Image (tube, rainbow, N blue to C red):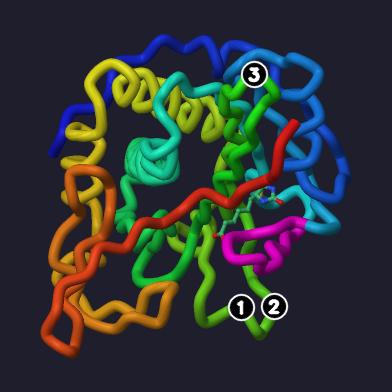
């Protein structure tokens, strides 16, 4: 296994902005970022009325059972590298799950976290460009922790740490571990580039070697993660394509 990233612990030691109910923590984090909140600021809600996932999908929750968080990032990296942030976040959350639960978590392209084939966490990265040309990324994580059941339409696809282990988890402790891992990987990515993240993602992925249907409707076998974070797919028609999971564009500030 690729070694855990070195840890600074600044994000975890700063108090999260806690909210009982909000439309989406992404919106609160964006407003805080616009007002100058520092990198690593965390917004945590107990319940979202308009939680959103990738590709415009809704993200629903059971109040008080999940980790619903958004983190403000101000990456110095060039724009083409920003999609790598959601891959490093997936690797970091996977590490936190392993550390806190010992469960065999797997990464599913681009950054879903699965336990025994069911989704336990998802990641949404939204980017904004400031007037000075710099980027802000709001990294949203929805993590199913203490749910003991899911609505019928989700039950076959979703799981939680509680369902997998039969016990409840301390969400504050989990958040702390997650932020330590995330901050560590983020700074390592800034200092060393994508290579260590790529290695961790490849080791933790269940996508490589499997059949995939990726966003653009391309079908084939996922053969590798490229050096820039693109998924390399050998298509059914015999060609090879590179698929980059883009960041959702949130517009300018
Ligand atoms: C996905 O799997 O499609 C990504 C889900 C991301 C959900 C989280 S919950 C906290 C944050 N606020 C949101 O509205 N979405 C993200």
Tag 2 and tag 1, C-beta contact below 8 Å: yes
The residue under label 3 is 132
Specify which label sits upstream in the sequence, 3 or 1: 3
Q: Is residue 62 left or right of residue 82?
A: right
The answer to whether residue 52 is above or below residue 216 is: above
Q: Where residue 168 sits: x, y (%)?
A: 57, 49
The residue under label 1 is 154
Magenta residue span: 51-62
Q: Is residue 109 left or right of residue 135?
A: left
Q: Secondary structure at mark 2?
A: loop
In the image, is the residue at mark 2 within 8 Å of ligand 1 by its beta carbon?
A: no
Of residues 97 and 25, which is closer to you in this image? 25
Q: Is residue 6 magenta?
A: no
Q: Sort mark 3 into few (<14), some (14-19) or many (20+) by Cα contacts within 10 Å.
A: few
Q: Secondary structure at mark 1?
A: helix
Residue placed at 41% from the left, 28% from the top?
78
Of residues 145 and 181, which is closer to you in this image? 181
Tell me the distance, in whole angstroms, between the alpha carbons under discs 3 and 1: 42 Å
Q: Secondary structure at mark 3?
A: loop
Residue placed farthest to the front in the image? 132
Residue placed at 58% from the left, 61% from the top?
54
Q: Where residue 209 sits: x, y (%)?
A: 14, 71
In the image, is the residue at mark 1 within 8 Å of ligand 1 by its beta carbon?
A: no
Quarter of the figure that contains the N terminus: top left
User: Closer to us: mark 3 or mark 1?
Assistant: 3
Q: Sort mark 2 into few (<14), some (14-19) or many (20+) by Cα contacts within 10 Å.
A: few
Tell me the distance, in whole angstroms, between the alpha carbons under discs 2 and 1: 6 Å
Main SS type for the magenta part?
A: loop
The answer to whether residue 240 is above or below residue 183 is: below
Label drawn at residue 151: 2
Tell me the distance, in whole angstroms, between the alpha carbons under discs 2 and 3: 45 Å
The answer to whether residue 8 is above or below residue 165 is: above
């Amino acid at each position: 296994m690729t070694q855990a990233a070195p840890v600074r612990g600044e994000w975890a030691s700063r108090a999260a902005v806690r909210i009982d109910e909000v439309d989406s923590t992404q919106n609160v984090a964006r407003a805080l970022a616009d007002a100058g909140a520092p990198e690593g600021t965390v917004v945590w809600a107990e319940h979202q009325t308009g939680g959103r996932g990738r590709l415009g999908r809704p993200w629903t929750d059971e109040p008080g059972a999940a980790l619903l968080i958004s983190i403000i990032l101000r990456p110095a990296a060039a724009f083409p590298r920003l999609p790598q942030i959601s891959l490093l976040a997936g690797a970091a959350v996977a590490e936190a799950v392993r550390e806190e639960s010992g469960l065999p978590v797997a990464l599913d392209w681009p950054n879903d976290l699965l336990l025994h084939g069911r989704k336990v966490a998802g990641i949404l990265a939204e980017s904004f460009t400031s007037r000075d040309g710099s980027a802000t990324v709001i990294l949203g994580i929805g993590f199913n922790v203490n749910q003991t059941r899911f609505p019928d339409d989700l039950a076959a696809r979703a799981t939680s740490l509680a369902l997998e282990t039969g016990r409840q988890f301390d969400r504050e402790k989990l958040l702390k571990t997650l932020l330590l891992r995330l901050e560590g990987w983020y700074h390592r990515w800034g200092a060393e580039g994508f290579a260590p993240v790529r290695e961790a993602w490849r080791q933790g992925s269940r996508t490589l070697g499997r059949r995939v249907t990726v966003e653009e409707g391309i079908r084939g076998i996922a053969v590798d993660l490229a050096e820039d974070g693109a998924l390399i797919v050998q298509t059914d028609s015999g060609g090879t394509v590179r698929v980059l999971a883009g960041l959702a564009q949130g517009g300018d500030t």
